[in-house]
Amino acid sequence: MQNRKQQDSISVNDINQENDIRKVPQKSTGNAGKDPFCVYDHKRHAVGSRITTENGLQSVCTEEGSWKTSK
């Protein structure tokens, strides 16, 4: 999902199941108006952001703007 009308800053984040969102310090931030992003919990996250569930499964934000499950 991409809304190019918004110029919000986005960053690469690590998200756990309890919605504890931590920015990844070595990753640069982007702009939602020109860079791809994924939406989780009504917030925009840059490509490379990861969601980790309680059972250890991870989903990664892709260039297409969707979450892809990795093993």
Image: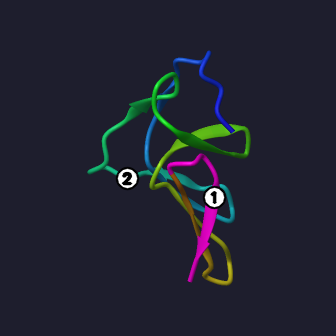
Q: Earlier in the sequence, mark 2 or mark 1?
A: 2
Give residue 24's mark.
2
Range shown magenta: 63-71
The residue carrying pointer 2 sits among few (fewer than 14), some (14 to 19) or many (20 or more) residues within 10 Å by Cα, namely some
The quarter of the displayed image where residue 38 is located: top right
For the residue labelled by badge 2, is the local secondary structure a helix, a strand or a loop? loop
Residue 46 rendering spot, x and y as whole percentages: 48, 43
Residue 30 rendering spot, x and y as whole percentages: 40, 32
Taking depth in this image into account, of 37 and 55 the one nearest to the observer is: 37
Measure how far apart labels 2 and 1 are at the Cα level. Answer: 17 Å
Q: Is residue 6 above or below residue 55?
A: above
Which residue is tagged 1? 67
Residue 55 rendering spot, x and y as whole percentages: 68, 84
The residue carrying pointer 1 sits among few (fewer than 14), some (14 to 19) or many (20 or more) residues within 10 Å by Cα, namely many
Amino acid type, label 1: Trp
The structure residue drawn at horizontal position 73% and vertical position 45%, both measured from the top left corner, is: 41
Taking depth in this image into account, of 59 and 42 the one nearest to the observer is: 59
